[in-house]
């Protein structure tokens, strides 16, 4: 494919996608497509031809661009980006995901985060969800033998921690966090938006520089 | 000198036979003191002497039965006291051992020891280190020691039934009486005396003893009022010879070594001086005093051992620094000891919650840390006990460590907590100690605007004391804060605008806090902060304007800053904000004008921008004293320009000011009096002040003790007195005597301005002669002529010139030897030449003073004065020489010194 034809195709694609997403203009979408293609290129070496980024490649992207480190959370982000659950993030999913979730308004972000922590999709963040989200925080040594006591101690600690968190965030006292609970807590303290793991870009500016502005120069 | 503490306190440390008291002068003096009391007890306080101890005091003695007088039953070498009714009681004296059951017995036994009294007292103390328990019984003693000062006296009385206990209750009650009333002025005096006593002499233990604050409140306390509410009286810094300084809190519950808990901390009990000196209970307290003093020495020794290793190298330098520190130094800091949380706080659920939160804060990863930070924000961080608990659990250090990481969200959370914690004074100091201020300053460079803003706001809180302000400056914080202002002013993007504004506001707040140190003022000015602050003045946001004007106001005490303020049109905006609805802003603006209007150009600018009228309007806010003080201050400084006075008079400001001469706080009065002085330079106003009855309150203010006020009031009166009608009123109110008495004031400024005020009074008063003669206070004049302050000298010369018109007074003055004193002054400073020649001229009128001046050598310098460029000096010198020329010898001198030639030129 010649580079000019490639360019044209991308411009056309950008045109259509930019109509569907809210927070990017056409120029930015174009940049994002360039970036996506570059990432896809890097992936092709190991795999044949694919329609989108696979889980591992996507996680690498999240790590490099947004400095995310939490594997568990990155999995969740992939799941949410991959709307049709086919194991790949396509170019459209990529741009829509970035648009709504990373550049969204506070309200959109609240929903996004809540969705992220609602592991089973039950509409609530339950105790089990919180347990799974926080269990790595104490570096549990489940596998080690003869550590039964330690394990029990740490189990207790997580439970205690969970009580503290629920006491703070569970406003209706039903033992789980509804979206209303979550929203109310975030309203009171914005930092709680990412209470159970960082899932929003830390360095939006850096991303803008690296992806949006840099590509514009080309 | 240099006797180490450990040697002095041989009580406890090195000898295995621990309870021996070494003979040092300090100890000896103490023993003597105790002895005097014990000896007198029987005669002076018979009732207290009868009071029986709970358990006998027992020690090894050198007294034998043969020393005892007839008051004892003696069998072999054993003796019983007459006082003991029952024979079953154990004997008072067996060979080498004595058991004493009452103060009376103690007294008699000591007296029997004849020339070994001191040794006996010493043995008594050494043998009974728990004497308080023995005397009062374990229950009361422990109450005293653990300080049950708040224990209910009544309930104590119910418990005790027999007579002996009643005296005990009285002892306790007496003690309790001294404690809860903060009003007793002499409360801490005795401790101070005692400690200062320890710091005297060659063999001293203590280097110095001083209060942290020179300011004493009306009730005799030195602690700030909000600490007084907690029962604190004053803070004392004790510097011992070997260790560093110890901070001590004196409160109603006793005296505590800061940072040391338990009964060992209470080392000197509360008591009144007279109580100690005049009552038998005082003996017990003396003993207690001594006992606890030993405990204090013990704790000092322990501390000494602890800090020896790292203090050794630095101690000499730091001690020298410490002792040379004076309160006037701007960077000096006032150590305020902190109050430990009450013990029941440690049992509260809140404390447990803090413990839990801090534990997980430290233990978890950043996810959990962030959660815990959010939870910590729910704590009541306005409570000191909460904050101290967080610190003591290690939370504060952790929060500060978070500032050095890259986790912006955690930083924001930590800063949100730190902002609140840093309102608590002890936390501010801890943060500085933990190098937190540096971390905060580093965060001012953060890429995240919110972090910058929060860090700046925290700095604004922490920079509440000099050491932190210095750190901010030394770590380059001033420049970074100014950069925040710059960022906001340059930011164009709308999306960032609000965030940047918030950062600028916090930056201004921090600058305001920092600008309280002189060096920081200079730093702000030289870093170009003033023009930026000036630009921010155009903002319409009050929360922004107050810190901006506040900083400007602080900086305006530096002359270099004032020049910038003038040239940058800042005055215009200050004037504009005088009309703001926000009183705090009005106060800051008025204060800024007060400081800036020292310069003529500024005063003209204030007039140009029509700032005088709003200042006058502020005078109507008579309820807000702070605002009133600021407004009157600005009016005072503005009225130094006579054009401004004329405009002020259109609004009848003089009348309003005269109305403010009564029932106002001193800050207002000082400024009002200052302003009146300037107003009265306009002749027409002299009649106005009379008509609106302003003279009487002014004269009454002469009885004030505030020196700044006295200076200003005397100046105002001086301006009044040039009018004859006014003088009549001053005479009626006996103003001259009041002014004259101010010559006794120790402050040279007050002396000088009083003397200047006396001059026109004498000149214009009809019966000044009679008034002045009735003073009998001329003795003060020769003293003042020996003053080192030129203004005082000049003013006194002027007074002498006036007084010398009266022959009788001149005679008295001559007797006091002013001729030689005046002559001595002829060879000194330029400034006072005019008044000096004047005084000499007038003094020549009496007897042979003319010749006396000649002999003393006054002629020669006067001839030199003739060459002066100042016409007033030449004029008065000529007059003086004319008077002196009545004596032929003087003429010879004049001729030889070329006076004729000079006069012809």
Image (cartoon, rainbow, N blue to C red):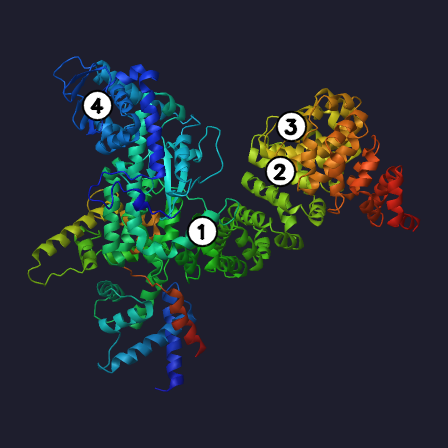
Q: Residues within 10 Å of mark 2 (few under 14, many from 20)?
A: many
Instruction: Tell if the residue under mark 3 belongs to the same chain as the one under mark 2.
Output: yes
Q: CA distance from mark 3 to mark 2?
A: 23 Å
Q: Residue at x 86, y 45 (%)?
A: B893
Tag of residue B505: none
Q: CA distance from mark 2 to mark 4?
A: 71 Å
SS assignment at label 3: loop
Q: Which residue in the rendered view is the most extreme toward the left?
A: A146
Q: Which residue is mark 4?
A: B100
Q: CA distance from mark 2 to mark 1?
A: 44 Å
Tag of residue B631: 2
Where residue A41 sits in the image (x, y, percent)? Answer: 29, 80
Q: Which residue in the rendered view is the most extreme toward the front?
A: B66
- Please state, as top left, top right, bottom left or bottom right, where the C terminus of chain A lies in the image: bottom left
Instruction: Tell if the residue under mark 2 belongs to the same chain as the one under mark 1.
Output: yes
Where residue B558 sits in the image (x, y, percent)? Answer: 60, 51
Which is nearer the eye, A26 or B880? B880
Where residue B115 sits in the image (x, y, percent)? Answer: 30, 28
Which is nearer the eye, B493 or B568? B568
SS assignment at label 2: helix
Which is in the foreground here, disc 3 or disc 2?
A: 3
Q: Residues within 10 Å of mark 1 (few under 14, many from 20)?
A: few
Residue B64 found in image quarter = top left
């Amino acid at each position: 494919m010649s580079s000019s034809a490639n360019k044209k195709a991308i411009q056309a694609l950008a045109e259509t996608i930019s109509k569907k997403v809210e927070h990017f203009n056409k120029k930015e979408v174009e940049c994002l497509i360039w970036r996506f293609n570059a990432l896809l290129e890097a992936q092709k070496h190991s795999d044949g031809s694919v329609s989108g980024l696979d889980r591992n490649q996507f996680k690498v992207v999240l790590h490099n661009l947004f400095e995310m480190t939490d594997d568990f959370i990155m999995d969740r982000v992939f799941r949410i980006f991959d709307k049709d659950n086919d194991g790949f993030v396509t170019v459209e999913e990529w741009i829509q995901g970035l648009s709504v979730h990373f550049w969204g308004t506070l309200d959109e972000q609240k929903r996004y985060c809540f969705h992220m922590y609602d592991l089973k999709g039950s509409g609530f963040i339950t105790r089990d969800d919180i347990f799974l989200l926080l269990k790595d925080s104490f570096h549990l040594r489940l596998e080690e033998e003869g550590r039964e006591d330690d394990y029990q101690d740490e189990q207790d600690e997580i439970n205690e921690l969970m009580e503290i968190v629920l006491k703070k965030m569970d406003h209706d006292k039903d033992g789980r966090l509804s979206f209303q609970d979550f929203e109310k807590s975030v309203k009171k303290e914005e930092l709680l938006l990412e209470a159970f793991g960082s899932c929003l870009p830390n360095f939006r500016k850096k991303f803008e520089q690296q992806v949006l502005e840099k590509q514009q120069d080309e | 000198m240099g006797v180490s503490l450990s040697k002095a306190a041989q009580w406890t440390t090195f000898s295995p036979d621990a309870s021996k008291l070494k003979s040092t002068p300090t100890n000896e003096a103490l023993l003597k003191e105790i002895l005097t009391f014990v000896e007198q007890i029987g005669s002076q306080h018979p009732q207290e002497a009868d009071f029986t101890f709970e358990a006998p005091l027992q020690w090894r003695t050198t007294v034998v039965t043969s020393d005892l007088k007839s008051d004892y039953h003696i069998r072999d070498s054993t003796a019983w006291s007459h006082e003991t009714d029952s024979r079953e009681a154990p004997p008072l004296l067996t060979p080498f051992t004595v058991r004493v059951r009452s103060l009376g017995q103690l007294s008699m036994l000591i007296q029997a020891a004849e020339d070994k009294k001191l040794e006996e007292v010493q043995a008594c103390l050494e043998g009974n280190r728990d004497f308080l328990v023995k005397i009062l019984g374990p229950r009361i003693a422990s109450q005293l020691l653990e300080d049950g000062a708040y224990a209910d006296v009544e309930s104590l009385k119910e418990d005790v039934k027999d007579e002996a206990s009643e005296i005990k209750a009285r002892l306790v009650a007496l003690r309790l009486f001294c404690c809860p009333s903060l009003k007793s002025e002499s409360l801490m005096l005795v401790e101070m005396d005692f400690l200062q006593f320890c710091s005297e002499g060659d063999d001293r233990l203590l280097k110095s003893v001083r209060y942290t604050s020179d300011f004493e409140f009306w009730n005799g306390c030195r602690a700030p009022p909000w600490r007084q509410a907690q029962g604190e009286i004053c803070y004392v810094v004790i510097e011992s010879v070997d260790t560093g300084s110890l901070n001590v809190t004196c409160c109603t519950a006793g005296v505590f070594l800061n940072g040391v808990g338990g009964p060992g901390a209470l080392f000197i009990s509360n008591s009144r001086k007279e109580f100690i000196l005049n009552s038998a209970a005082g003996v017990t307290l003396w003993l207690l005093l001594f006992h606890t003093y030993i405990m204090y020495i013990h704790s000092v020794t322990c501390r000494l051992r602890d800090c020896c290793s790292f203090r050794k190298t630095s101690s000499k330098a730091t001690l020298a620094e410490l002792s040379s520190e004076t309160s006037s130094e701007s960077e000096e800091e006032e150590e305020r000891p902190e109050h430990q949380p009450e013990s029941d706080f440690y049992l509260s659920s809140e404390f447990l919650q803090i413990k839990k939160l801090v534990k997980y804060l430290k233990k978890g990863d950043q996810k959990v840390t962030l959660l815990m930070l959010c939870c910590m924000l729910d704590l009541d961080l306005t409570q000191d006990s909460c904050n101290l608990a967080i610190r003591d659990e290690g939370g504060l250090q952790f929060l500060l460590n978070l500032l050095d990481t890259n986790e912006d969200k955690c930083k924001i959370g930590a800063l949100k907590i730190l902002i609140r914690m840093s309102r608590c004074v002890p936390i501010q100091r801890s943060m500085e100690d933990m190098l937190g201020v540096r971390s905060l300053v580093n965060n001012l460079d953060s890429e995240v605007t919110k972090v910058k803003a929060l860090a700046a706001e925290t700095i604004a809180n922490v920079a509440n004391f000099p050491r932190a302000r210095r750190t901010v400056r030394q770590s380059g914080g001033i420049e970074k804060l100014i950069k925040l202002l710059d960022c906001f002013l340059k930011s164009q993007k709308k999306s960032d605008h609000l965030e940047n504004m918030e950062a600028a506001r916090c930056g201004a707040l921090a600058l305001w806090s920092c600008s309280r140190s002189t060096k920081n003022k200079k730093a702000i000015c030289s870093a170009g902060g003033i023009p930026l602050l000036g630009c921010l003045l155009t903002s319409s946001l009050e929360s922004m304007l107050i810190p901006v004007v506040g900083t400007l106001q602080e900086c305006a005490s530096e002359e270099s800053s004032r020049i910038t303020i003038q040239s940058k049109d800042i005055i215009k905006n200050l004037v504009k904000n005088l009309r703001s609805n926000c009183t705090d802003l009005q106060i800051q603006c008025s204060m800024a004008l007060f400081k800036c209007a020292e310069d003529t150009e500024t005063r003209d600018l204030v007039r140009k921008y029509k700032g005088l009228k709003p200042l006058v309007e502020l005078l109507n806010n008579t309820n807000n004293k702070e605002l009133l003080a600021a407004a009157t201050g600005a009016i005072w400084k503005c009225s130094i320009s006579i054009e401004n006075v004329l405009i002020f008079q259109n609004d009848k400001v003089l009348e309003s000011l005269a109305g403010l001469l009564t029932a106002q706080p001193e800050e207002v009065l000082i400024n009002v009096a200052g302003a009146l002085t300037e107003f009265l330079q306009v002749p027409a106003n002299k009649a106005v002040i009379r008509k609106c009855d302003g003279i009487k309150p002014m004269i009454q203010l002469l009885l004030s003790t505030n020196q700044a006020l006295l200076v200003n009031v005397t100046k105002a009166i001086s301006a009044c007195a040039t009018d004859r009608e006014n003088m009549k009123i001053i005479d009626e109110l006996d103003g001259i005597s009041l002014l004259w008495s101010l010559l006794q004031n120790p402050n040279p400024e007050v002396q000088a301005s009083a003397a200047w005020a006396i001059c026109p009074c004498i000149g214009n008063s009809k019966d000044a002669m009679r008034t002045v003669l009735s003073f009998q206070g001329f003795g003060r004049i020769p003293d003042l002529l020996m003053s080192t302050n030129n203004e005082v000298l000049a003013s006194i010369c002027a007074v002498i010139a006036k007084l010398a018109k009266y022959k009788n007074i001149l005679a008295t003055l001559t007797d006091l030897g002013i001729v030689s004193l005046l002559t001595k002054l002829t060879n000194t400073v330029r400034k006072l030449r005019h008044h000096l020649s004047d005084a000499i001229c007038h003094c020549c009128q009496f007897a042979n003073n003319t010749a006396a001046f000649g002999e003393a050598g006054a002629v020669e310098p006067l001839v030199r004065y003739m060459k002066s460029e100042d016409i007033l000096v030449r004029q008065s010198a000529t007059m003086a020489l004319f008077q002196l020329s009545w004596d032929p010898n003087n003429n010879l001198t004049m001729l030889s010194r070329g006076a004729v030639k000079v006069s012809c030129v």
